[in-house]
Amino acid sequence: MTREEVKQKLSEYLDAVDSLNTARQNLEALENQLTGISIDYSNERVTSSQISFDRIGDQVDQLAALRDEFERRKQHALDLMHGAVQLVNLCQTALRYELISRRYIRGESWEEIMSAMHYSYSQIFKIHADCIDEIARRSESSE
């Protein structure tokens, strides 16, 4: 596996988590609409509204489809997480493991990682590059 393939495989999990969160928000929005509750996250307000009974059947069908899509995305994210964890486990030092886990499993920003691990940008990027190289080498030898 090349360096770019390793980074792509690790990044796919975070992309799937973002997609899962979007599906969850869409599902919650429709559930709230069906129950007549509206949540405005920007103002943290909850209001109640009337819903037309002729649209309920369509919205229930849409809700079922969204639930199915959410479950499909959740399973996809779990499959990708398993693959990402296998790659992360190829890191041989605790330092590299922590950095790669924070970045690709937890989804932390570079700034969060630097702050938590008490390293500079250049140190973090050097450790990251070394670990990606290590994962690429070790994944090829295990195939």
Image (cartoon, rainbow, N blue to C red):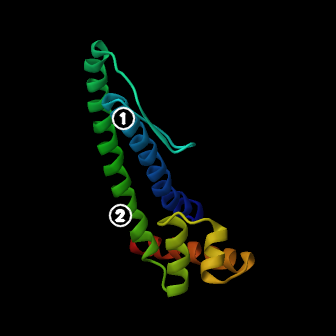
> For the residue marked with disc 2, what is the amino acid?
His
Q: Quadrant of residue 8?
A: bottom right
Q: Quadrant of residue 35?
A: top left
Does residue 38 appear to the left or right of 96 in the view shown?
left
Q: What SS does tag 2 mark?
A: helix
- Disc 1 crowd, CA 10 A, few/some/many (<14, 14-19, 20+): some
Label 1 amino acid? Asn
Which disc number belongs to residue 32? 1
> Under tag 1, what secondary structure?
helix
Q: Position of residue 142 (x, y in %)?
A: 39, 74
Residue 37: x %, y % from top left? 38, 34
Q: Earlier in the sequence, mark 2 or mark 1?
A: 1
Front residue of this view, candidates 45 and 69: 45
Discs 2, 1 touching: Cβ within 8 Å = no
Look at 56% across and 64% down and name the residue there: 2
Q: Position of residue 67 (x, y in %)?
A: 29, 38
The residue at which mark 2 appears reads as 82
Query: Percent position (x, y) of residue 16?
Result: 44, 50
Kindly report the distance in space between the C-alpha atoms of the residues bearing marks 2 and 1.
32 Å
